[in-house]
Image (cartoon, grey):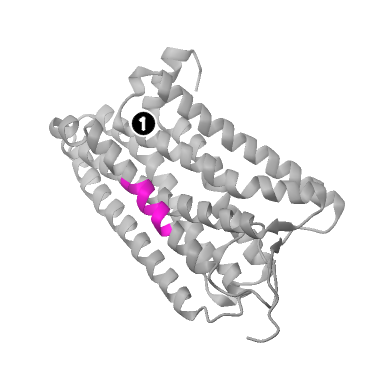
Amino acid sequence: MENQTSITEFLLLGFSDLRELQILHFLVFLSMYLAALIGNFLIICIVVQNRHLHSPMYFFLVNLSFLDAGYISTTVPKSMANSIVNNKQISYSGCVTQVFFIAAFAIAEPLILTVMAYDRYVAICHPLKYTVIMNRNACFQMAAASWLSSAINAAVYTANTFSLRFCSSNIVRQFFCDIPQLLKISCSDTSTMIWNLLAVTVIVGSFCFGFVFVSYGYIFSAVFKMQSVQARHKTFSTCIPHMTVFSLFLTTGIFSYLRPRSLSSAPVDLLSALPYAVLPPLLNPIIYCLRNSSWQLSVSKDYGIAL
């Protein structure tokens, strides 16, 4: 194309141009960011220090907490900094970095949650074989496979996104560098990449949803056969938090990326990313700590914390 200009930076969309609202945005994001970091790192520290929690279930929970802490740290701090200094700029390399880590964490989250569903399936439906199937090597291999596959896919997404030409505009209509918003401002033909991105998203999402759905089908079938009411309650207390977290991430992600074009506008695009990018890392520690009775009993016994 003729008359192209090389873009060296992008402009991120803010929530408001009013100084008072920018400060409010900074304070709200700061409180949510600190709450998410404290909650997730508290889970990591307690699991690492408490031998009673050295089990596959909590090993994967540590992975999820580390993932959530990294996920929210990729987007929120830059948005806070831009609000407090009244500056919307992000460098080209900074945008590339954001896209890579957002994609990596966003893909790793459903994969880790799927592995956690498999862990609950083995523990409840095959308890006598649990220690054999979910041994240390198997747990590390499943976690490593989730992280590695997400990193590879993120690298491919990032390379494909920034192989496009950006010559008409550098305004990203989001508070972070989001792939769909970057595709909208590209002057290259993005139809092939959009379809590839949609196909991979549907395939990964369908696989994770299908695997979790089938796993919990077997789990609930086994639970309803239990004679002990206490055993049923204990089983549900370990499964409900996982189901809640998985449903939260899935529904917010679908609404953010797969909603109809008729519901797409600058304000809607901006606000729809909040549940997807901020809420899961913020609410996951709360859901697990408050709904998991095994966690409550272990922590209150060893640390004297009343949950």
Magenta-colored span? 145-153
Q: State the image quarter where residue 188 is shown.
A: bottom right
Location of residue 81 with respect to 176 vertically, above or below: above
Residue 148 highlighted magenta (yes or no): yes
Location of residue 161 with respect to 17 vertically, above or below: below
For image coordinates 58% across by 77% down, the residue present is 262
Give the residue pinned by disc 1.
58
Q: Quadrant of the N terminus?
A: bottom right
Left or right? Give the position of 247 relative to 32.
left
Left or right? Give the position of 189 relative to 192.
right
- Magenta stretch, main secondary structure class: helix
Find residue 288 and report its horizontal and vertical position in percent. Answer: 44, 35
Location of residue 188 with respect to 75 vertically, above or below: below
Left or right? Give the position of 199 relative to 230.
right
Q: Disc 1 residue type?
A: Tyr
For image coordinates 40% across by 20% down, the residue present is 297
Residue 71 appearing in the image:
yes
Residue 116 appearing in the image:
no
